Image: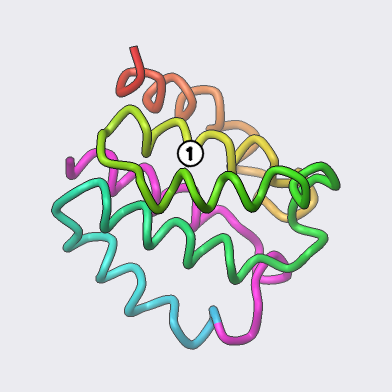
């Protein structure tokens, strides 16, 4: 579980400030603590939805608007590591390159491989 928490934190840490709302900047430190302390997939999925809810509209691909409602529903019922991993990967893959750090672009392949270890 701890590894998955860390992967979520790594994704969030590689978002540029312009990707998120002003409210997120105030909430972020507590959110990081909450993710670190999360002990099950349901908690992580709730925190993932909270992160996504604080994305600026241009932080995600245009098709995300169509996917978002069903993605949130899936997050609300996620109960396995596989489900959570798939949901996090889906959000990451719909996040635009413009709002992630240059380091993320280099590190992403390794991160995705680690995520797939939970799915396979």
Q: Which residue is mark 1?
A: 87
Please determine whether, in this image, residue 101 is positioned above or below residue 105: below
53 left or right of 43 in image: right
Please determine whether, in this image, residue 91 is positioned above or below residue 115: below
Image location of residue 20, percent across then percent down = 65, 70
Image location of residue 97, percent across then percent down = 76, 44
Quadrant holding the N terminus: top left
105 left or right of 84 in image: right
Q: Which quadrant holds residue 119?
A: top left
Q: Nearer the viewer, residue 66 or 24?
A: 66
Q: Residue at x 22, y 60 (%)?
A: 36
Quadrant holding the C terminus: top left
Q: Can residue 97 be found in the magenta stretch?
A: no
10 left or right of 89 in image: left
Q: Residue at x 60, y 57 (%)?
A: 15
Q: Nearer the viewer, residue 102 or 47?
A: 47
Q: Which residues are magenta?
A: 1-23
């Amino acid at each position: 579980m701890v590894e998955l928490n860390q992967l979520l934190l790594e994704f969030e840490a590689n978002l540029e400030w312009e990707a998120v709302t002003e409210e997120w900047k105030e909430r972020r430190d507590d959110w990081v603590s909450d993710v670190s302390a999360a002990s099950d997939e349901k908690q992580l999925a709730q925190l993932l939805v909270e992160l996504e809810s604080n994305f600026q509209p241009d932080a995600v691909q245009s098709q995300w608007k169509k996917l978002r409602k069903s993605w949130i529903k899936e997050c609300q019922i996620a109960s396995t590591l596989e489900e959570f991993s798939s949901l996090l990967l889906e959000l990451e893959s719909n996040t635009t390159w413009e709002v992630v750090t240059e380091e993320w672009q280099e590190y992403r392949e390794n991160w995705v491989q680690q995520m797939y270890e939970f799915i396979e």
